[in-house]
Structure formats: C-alpha cells, structure tokens
C-alpha cells in the first residue's frame, strides 16, 4: 500500500516545519493497523519540496517520520518505509533544484520502494488526496484511490482527462475498507 503523507495520513499543514503542526487524522492509526493485519506492506510516499526551497531540512522530515511511526506504534500499527522527494525545479538549494523521476506525478519513489521492499506493484494500491498521487501510482502500475481529505475534495471537482481512480472515498479509513473488503471476497490479491 502506497500512501501519501500530507492530506491523506496526516492533516494538510502546507509546508510542515514544526512537529506541533503534525496531526494524524483520528482514523489513520486504525487504517494502517488494518492494512498491517491484512498482510499489506505500508509505504508512505511524499513530495517534500520544502527541502529544496529551504523551508525545512532533510533532518526535520526524518524527525517527522519518526514521530508518525511513534504515534502509529502506540496504536499497534507501523509503516514499512518512508520515501520522500526533496527536489523542486524552483528550489533555492542548487543541489536539489532539478527535474527528477522521484517527484510525483512521476513514479520513481514507488519503483524504488518496490525494489527495496520486494513489492508487487501490480498487486498494490496508491492512496492520495491529489491527482498527482494517483498519476504516480498508475505510472508505476498500481491501483489508485483518491481521498476527499486534504486537497481531495477540490481535486475531485477538477478531474484529469484519462485518469480514472478505482474509487473516491471520504478518507483513509474508507479507502482501507474499500480495499480490504475486496481482498476479503477475493476480488483482489493481497501480497
């Protein structure tokens, strides 16, 4: 399971630059725990242009991910990997100012995670609140669900030509329910 971070797993906070602004949605722990129990690997995939723009550091992003993991662990859930893109073509940090294959909507992060963790992309889903999340998933060969949290409700109102999600759900919990109900009846295979 490839899950977007901001607006999907945690509340959208713009450029998240302080831990006191990091708020998990109240259902996130339960949704991740359900995926864990069903045998799905859970990978967080996130664009972090704030690094290239000089707003946050790489170290802060890693700290934020450790904090998320601690919150999830307190509820018996875990993420198997965090992958982020620090690049942006308009970045102020020259070493990170570029086009890359890892910035969603490109599929580089998903492919790297799949190679690192031995994930079958054809049997996976990407869940996110932006069309570019789903574009990355489709480009990598996964299923794709849009959630209405974060920017999702606005993106739902402006569909992209040629991009049809498998489902549009209210939030991560309902996306988990949609996926797991299909796994339970055998209409999709779990890893």
Image (cartoon, grey):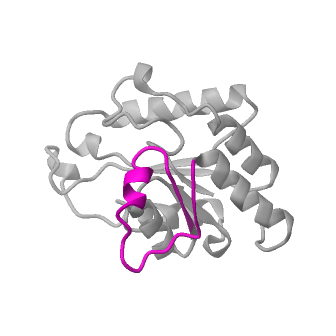
Horizontal and vertical percent for residue 150? Answer: 43, 44
Give yes or no for residue 117 being in the magenta stretch: no
Q: Residue furthest right?
A: 185
Does the rendering let one see residue 13?
A: yes
Residue drawn 66% across the image and 65% down it: 118
Is residue 185 depicted above or below 2 in this figure? below
Residue drawn 81% across the image and 48% down it: 37
Is residue 187 depicted above or below 34 in this figure? below
In this rendering, position of residue 142 left or right of residue 76: left
Horizontal and vertical percent for residue 48? Answer: 34, 45
Residue drawn 84% across the image and 72% down it: 186
Tell me the quadrant of the picture where the N terminus can be found.
Answer: bottom right
Q: Which residue is more in the foreground, 71 or 31?
A: 31
Q: Residue furthest bottom?
A: 162
Q: Which residue is more in the foreground, 36 or 30?
A: 30
In this rendering, position of residue 161 left or right of residue 190: left
Does the rendering let one see residue 80?
A: no
User: Where, by quadrant of the figure, is residue 54 drawn?
Assistant: top left
Is residue 148 depicted above or below 158 in this figure? above
In this rendering, position of residue 88 left or right of residue 141: left
Q: Residue furthest front?
A: 157
Q: Which residues are magenta?
A: 144-170
Horizontal and vertical percent for residue 45? Answer: 48, 52
In this rendering, position of residue 71 left or right of residue 46: right
Horizontal and vertical percent for residue 77? Answer: 72, 37
């Amino acid at each position: 399971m490839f899950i977007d971070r901001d607006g999907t797993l945690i509340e959208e906070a713009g450029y998240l630059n302080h831990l006191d602004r990091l708020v998990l949605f109240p259902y996130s722990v339960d949704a991740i725990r359900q995926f864990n129990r069903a045998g799905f690997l859970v990978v967080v995939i996130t664009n972090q242009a704030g690094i290239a723009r000089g707003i946050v550091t790489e170290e802060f992003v890693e700290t934020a991910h450790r904090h998320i993991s601690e919150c999830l662990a307190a509820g018996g859930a875990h993420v198997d990997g965090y992958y982020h893109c620090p690049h942006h073509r308009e970045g102020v940090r020259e070493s990170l100012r570029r086009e890359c294959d890892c910035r969603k909507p490109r599929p580089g992060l998903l492919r790297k995670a799949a190679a690192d963790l031995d994930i079958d992309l054809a049997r996976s889903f990407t869940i996110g609140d932006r069309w570019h999340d789903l574009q990355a998933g489709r480009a990598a060969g996964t299923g794709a669900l849009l959630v209405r949290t974060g920017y999702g409700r606005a993106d739902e109102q402006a569909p992209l030509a040629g991009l049809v999600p498998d489902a549009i759900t209210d939030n991560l919990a309902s996306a988990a329910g949609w996926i797991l109900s299909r796994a339970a009846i055998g209409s999709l295979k779990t890893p």
